[in-house]
Image: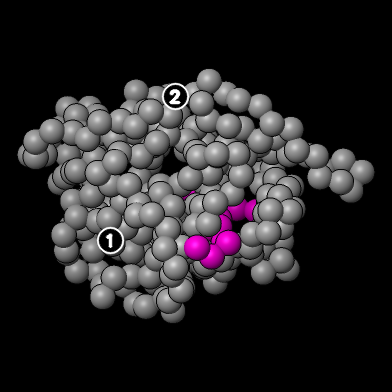
Amino acid sequence: MALRIRLAVAGGALAVVAGCSMLPVSAPQPSSGADQGTLSPAADARPGDASGEAAALAPGTSPAPQASPTSHRSPQPVATKPLPTAVADPGAKGPAEFVNRVATKDKVAFLTLDDGVVTDPNLITFLTDNKIPVTTFFTTMYGDGHWDYWRQISQLGSVQNHTVYHPTLTKLGEGGAAEEICSANKAITAEIGNTPWMLRPPYGVYGDSTLAAAGDCGLDYVVHWSVTLPDEEFHFQEGDHFLPGDIILSHYRDDLVPHLKIMLAELQRQGFRLARLEDYLPPKP
């Protein structure tokens, strides 16, 4: 069961209400064999949401957390220091590394925001005033007419890859997935000036072909999450509280700021702070 923690601020006090959702979090099995050519839908899919749910989810929705495949699970946390963010190498390389929680003993969590449907100036003010670092996984079809906004957002962390049109990448095969990923990288590099080195696959669905395509486009990491914040509720993939290195998933939406205020209060209550994902997962040399 995925534990859901509902938070509310009433009369200046933080209230915490716990409940359990009967959402399955069993680990999906790795695909067998190599991916070749065009794949049938979800042929090599490993759910971040289950692949069968992907078609029903629209950009801007937060999938329920699922356990990640053992073969691509992040290592056990060890003592790690953040590194200065380096310049990404856009050249093709081997398959990208899967990450759903950063291996660190530091009491830090990382805020990541997906898509880009909503461009709220008040969000930039809130993030700036509170010195909140944010990693944006941007769907570049939302950039037209709004690139100035995303250039401002990039100053608060970085803008990373969430494809061009938000497809289920495992349905495209390695070549089709690489076309989506590489095109998004080119757009972000041209408009914002930084080269992405992280991919978040739409709907969280990925497979061997996705990892290979990300590497083909020069990306180092395929980044999932360990906590979601779809509204005023936290959904923890493991346990009922924050863990060192947790990656928080939410989306750009109209009601985001009040929910981020709740998130900050709960992080502080548990003795955590937000850190830059870019410093803990810098580009690989």
Q: State yes or no: residue 117 in magenta.
A: yes
Residue 208 coordinates in the image, percent (x, y): 19, 43
* Amino acid type at mark 2: Pro
Residue appearing at x 18%, y 51% in the figure: 212
Residue that mark 2 sits on: 24
Count of numbered badges drawn on the protein: 2
Q: In this rendering, is residue 232 above or below 75?
A: above
Instruction: Determine if residue 100 is in view.
Output: yes
| Location of the C terminus (image quadrant) | bottom left
Residue 6 lies in what quarter of the image?
top right
Residue 48 lies in what quarter of the image?
top left
* Amino acid type at mark 1: Leu
Q: Is residue 45 left or right of residue 9?
A: left
Q: Is residue 2 left or right of residue 32?
A: right
Q: Viewer-proximal residue, 45 or 59?
A: 45
Instruction: Determine if residue 147 is in view.
Output: no
Image: magenta residue range: 105-120
Furthest-top residue in this view: 22
Q: Viewer-proximal residue, 152 or 133?
A: 133
Residue 82 coordinates in the image, percent (x, y): 46, 73
Q: Is residue 24 left or right of residue 243?
A: left
Residue appearing at x 36%, y 64% in the figure: 196
Q: In this rendering, is residue 237 above or below 134?
A: above
